[in-house]
Structure formats: structure tokens, C-alpha cells
Amino acid sequence: MSNLFDRLDRGRPPAEEKTKQPDPAQLLLNFLQRWTKPTISSRDIRIYGPKSIRNRESAVRSAQILAAQGWLVPLEARVWQVVRKNLTPTGSP
């Protein structure tokens, strides 16, 4: 015989799926889609960016990943130009 908690827990996803953290670089990319300025610095990321990447190491590492993928262009130490890309699939009107 199962208890109330076992019956309530049947429809829930496993606990490990709940604790999975999103990729910091993806969080920064999502944030950059709303960023209106043409450049961003590590200071801007630490002040205005997602809370989970507001430490210096995470901010710089995430920006370097996005620079390697072409979303940011390094201008000077810890300053990047934001590349605006059209995200619509090819062949769409």
C-alpha cells in the first residue's frame, strides 16, 4: 500500500531535471537579444546581466564562448561588439 506522498509523486519529473542549470553562455545570448547598445563590457554583464553570471569569471567566459561562435566581436580588453543576426530560417518570407 502506497502512502499519499508516493501517489502525489507519480506524475512529477525526476528531481535531477529540476536542478539542471541552463548554460551560462545561452543565458548571456538570451540577454543580448534584449540589449539595445552596440557594445557590451564585462562590467555591463555583471551589473545588468542574468544573476547567475554576474561574477567576473562567468561573465568573461560566457562572452568568450559567444565571441568564438560569432555573436560578439572583441574590441578591447573585456569589451565586445554585439553582432545582430537574423534568426529566421532560410527560405522564409
Image (spheres, helix red, strand yellow):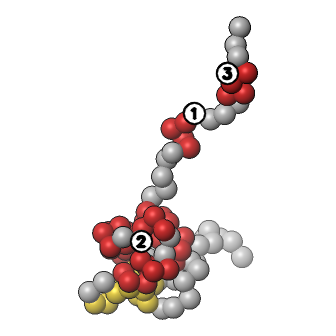
Q: Which of marks 2 and 1 is nearer the N terminus?
A: 1
**Residue sitting nearer the eye, 20 or 88:** 20
Q: Which of marks 3 and 2 is nearer the N terminus?
A: 3
Quadrant of residue 59 in the image? Answer: bottom left
Residue 14, horizontal then vertical, whole percent:
57, 33
Residue at 68% x, 24% y: name it: 5
Quadrant of residue 46 in the image? Answer: bottom left
Determine which residue is flagged by label 2. Answer: 54
Characterize the local packing of mark 2: few (<14), some (14-19) or many (20 or more) Cα atoms within 10 angstroms. Answer: some
Question: In this orientation, does residue 65 appear?
Answer: no
Determine which residue is flagged by label 3. Answer: 6
Residue 48, horizontal then vertical, whole percent:
50, 80
Spatial distance from mark 2 to mark 1, Cα to Cα?
29 Å
Characterize the local packing of mark 3: few (<14), some (14-19) or many (20 or more) Cα atoms within 10 angstroms. Answer: few
Examine the rendered structure and indicate whether residue 83 appears above or below residue 62: below
Q: The residue under label 3 is which amino acid type?
A: Asp
**Residue sitting nearer the eye, 26 or 8:** 8
**Residue sitting nearer the eye, 83 or 34:** 34
